[in-house]
Amino acid sequence: MVSGKYLYKVNLDTAAKVNEFVKAASKVEGSVSIVSGTKRINAKSFLGVLYAKVAWDNIYVECEKDCWWEFHSFIEE
């Protein structure tokens, strides 16, 4: 947990995974973002997440509440 938010490193190595991730994010209540350093994108945006998959080295999902269960299949151990 960072600054009262939950942060998990995720692996989105295919467009299909991006699509599944965005569907999962869309079901989560409240704000869900993907972050890398100082960059931040709405995790409920397919195009935004797809862009991050291509342009960013590391991607983390950030949630207001614990969202491990919703994203467990994308989280890197």
Image (cartoon, rainbow, N blue to C red):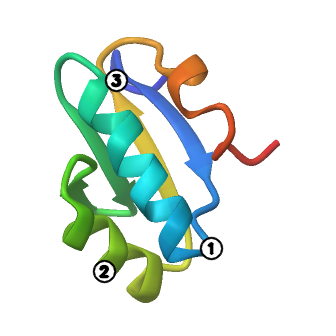
Residue 37, relative to residue 28: is it above or below? below
> How many angstroms separate mark 1 from mark 2 (CA)?
12 Å
Find residue 44 and name its label.
none
Q: Amino acid at mark 2?
A: Tyr
- Sort mark 1 into few (<14), some (14-19) or many (20+) by Cα contacts within 10 Å: few
In the rendered image, residue 74, in percent from the top left (x then y), is placed at 64, 46
Q: CA distance from mark 1 to mark 3?
A: 28 Å
The residue under label 2 is: 51
Mark 2 element type: helix
Which of these two is toward me, 56 or 37?
A: 56
**What amino acid is found at the position of numbered circle 1 in the picture?**
Asp
Residue 70 vs residue 38: left or right?
A: right
Name the amino acid, label 3: Ser
Count of labels shown? 3
Give the residue at mark 1: 13
Q: Nearer the viewer, mark 1 or mark 3?
A: 1
Residue at the spot x=36%, y=12% of the render?
65
User: Mark 1 or mark 3, which has the lower sequence index?
Assistant: 3
* Residue receiving disc 3: 3
Q: Quadrant of residue 4?
A: top left
